[in-house]
Amino acid sequence: MGIQGSHQECQICCEDKPACDYGLPLTTTCQHIYQTTCNKCVIRYVEKAFEETCRDDVRCPEPDCDGQLDYNVVKYILSCGDDKKVFDRYDRFILHRQLEQMDEFIWCSNPDCGMGQLSDSGSENNIITCFNCHKRTCFTHRVPWHEGLTCAEYDETKDADDEASQLWMIQNSKKCPNCPYRIEKNDGCDHMKCMKCSYEFCWSCLADYERIRKDGNHRHHPNCKHYAPYDGE
């Protein structure tokens, strides 16, 4: 894969560059014959794509190309860059993904640790002691070991907690009239704005606040404490 002629304008930085500034390997799944992105921009593109998405399937930078850069290509391109920290992060990211696909691997539940290990006994021995910080983790639930409770007993308490949380949410929140997002009101006025869809409404009667703002308080529901009869003006 090369360029047309001895020089070409890069489609990203728009600089005219010689053929030697092109030619970093991309992917065999690409449909384009020529490369219009210079090596420097390919490296920056791949670095930015990984930093922003934290994914291993980086798309080819060429216009209208749906090809995906595989692991070896991305690793090679990042190794050509000046920021070796990005290359190291990508390498760790791939390693973590591979480890997490192994049933016998478990991360330490201590948030200050960041280590993981393989456990041959797995669910047969649910208490996993970290080699690094010596904190204990439940292999089944991937949480700090629930001292004094078997896994079955922990499930029962967790189910009870989940039910209590769901009941509290129903009793102390309301669904946005415009989307399924539930909103909790702690204090303040009844003029609410949904964090999900930005819809504005009255907490008491769920009336559309845009209509209230435009027409007046008669747009509240008649049973609402903020309702005021239309005065005709």
Image (tube, rainbow, N blue to C red):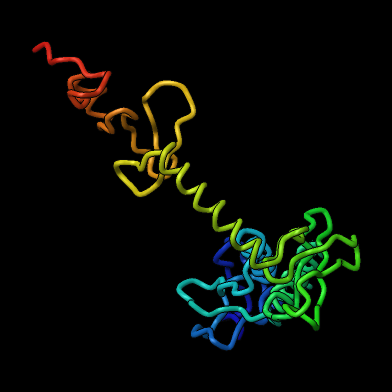
**Horizontal arrangement in the rendering, residue 129 relative to residue 199 (left or right):** right
Looking at the image, is 158 positioned above or below residue 170? below
Residue 95 lies, in percent from the top left, at 75, 75
Whole-percent x, y for residue 150 in the image: 71, 66
Q: Looking at the rendering, in which quadrant would you find the C terminus?
A: top left
Residue nearer the viewer, 189 or 173: 173
- Which residue is at the far bottom? 28
Q: In the rendered view, would you say 101 is above or below 167?
A: below
Q: Is residue 114 left or right of residue 12?
A: right
In this view of the protein, which residue sits in the foreground, 91 or 8?
91
Looking at the image, which is closer to me, 51 or 73?
A: 51
Q: Position of residue 31 (x, y in %)?
A: 49, 85
The residue located at (75%, 80%) in the rendering is 124
Q: Residue at x 17, y 23 (%)?
A: 222
**Residue drawn where x is 31% and y is 32% of the image:** 201
Q: Quadrant for the N terminus, please.
A: bottom right
